[in-house]
Image: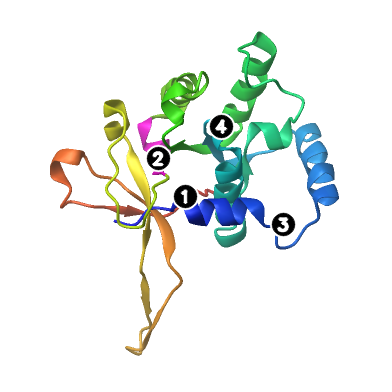
């Protein structure tokens, strides 16, 4: 199994976006809010991991072509340190407008005030098959051991994929992200699920 590493997420979070300036991103965020945007992924995370989360968002958007909601990017005026009805309403609306959730877990996520609430709401609204856990680990190949209840969900992992054509030729594809659905007790029965997007 190969997860996204802390170093990779940190690098991507600290580099400017590939195709847009910060001004354009800010304008886009305002436009998306006004149009009640639909998202492929609601990215649940600890705000303490802001740089890492921005890196994950960029990996999913730039490499995967997915639309990803991160609350403090779309709504920088929200106060993540306090639980308020206004903030809950905004986050709830974003989850209702998202096809799936990625629960980004790290050393700081167990102390998040929002993540357990987001997970419970999303699982209850969309079902556990629309939730996946993305462990951020120090080194690739490191095993992930998170909170026990996270074993109920698939994990987002990187996989080497080969494309084989009907003529028998094949080529290596870039490492792809996929959700591995597997209860911890039966790790040998992996099922690769395409990454979340349901366009249309």
Picture layout, residue 59 above or below residue 26: below
Instruction: Looking at the picture, tell me which residue is in the foreground, 200 or 71.
Output: 71
Marked residue nearer the N-terminal end (1 or 4): 1
Q: Position of residue 197 (x, y in %)?
A: 52, 49
Per the model, the C-alpha gap separating discs 4 and 2 is 20 Å
* Tag 1 and tag 4, C-beta contact below 8 Å: no
Per the model, the C-alpha gap separating discs 3 and 4 is 20 Å
Per the model, the C-alpha gap separating discs 2 and 1 is 18 Å
Q: Which mark is residue 124?
A: none
Q: Which mark is residue 16?
A: 3
Residue under the image location 56 percent in, 42 percent down: 53
Tell me the residue that label 2 is attached to. 132
Label 3 vs label 2, nearer the camera: 3
Q: Which mark is residue 6?
A: 1
Per the model, the C-alpha gap separating discs 1 and 4 is 13 Å
Marked residue nearer the N-terminal end (2 or 1): 1
Picture layout, residue 199 above or below residue 44: below
Task: Tell me which corner region of the image, top left, top right, bottom left or bottom right, holds residue 105.
Answer: top left
Marked residue nearer the N-terminal end (3 or 4): 3
Query: Position of 156 compared to 184: left or right?
Result: right
Quarter of the image containing the N terminus?
Answer: bottom left
Q: Position of residue 46 (x, y in %)?
A: 53, 30
**Bounds of the magenta segment:** 128-135
* Tag 2 and tag 1, C-beta contact below 8 Å: no
């Amino acid at each position: 199994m190969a997860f996204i590493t802390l170093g990779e997420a940190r690098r991507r979070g600290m580099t400017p976006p590939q195709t847009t300036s910060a001004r354009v991103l800010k304008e886009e965020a305002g436009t998306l809010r006004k149009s009640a945007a639909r998202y492929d992924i609601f990215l649940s995370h600890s705000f303490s991991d802001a740089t890492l989360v921005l890196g994950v968002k960029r990996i999913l958007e730039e490499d995967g072509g997915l639309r990803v909601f991160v609350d403090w990017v779309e709504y920088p005026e929200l106060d993540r340190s306090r639980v308020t009805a206004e903030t809950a309403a905004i986050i709830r609306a974003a989850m209702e407008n998202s096809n799936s959730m990625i629960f980004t877990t790290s050393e700081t996520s167990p102390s998040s005030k929002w993540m357990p609430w987001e997970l419970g709401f999303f699982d209850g609204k969309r079902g556990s098959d629309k939730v996946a856990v993305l462990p951020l680990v120090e080194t690739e190949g490191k095993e992930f051991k998170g909170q026990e209840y996270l074993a109920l969900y698939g994990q987002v992992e990187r996989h080497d994929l080969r494309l084989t054509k009907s003529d028998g030729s094949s080529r290596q594809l870039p490492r792809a992200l996929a959700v591995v659905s597997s209860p911890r007790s039966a790790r040998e029965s992996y099922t690769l699920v395409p990454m979340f997007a349901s366009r249309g």
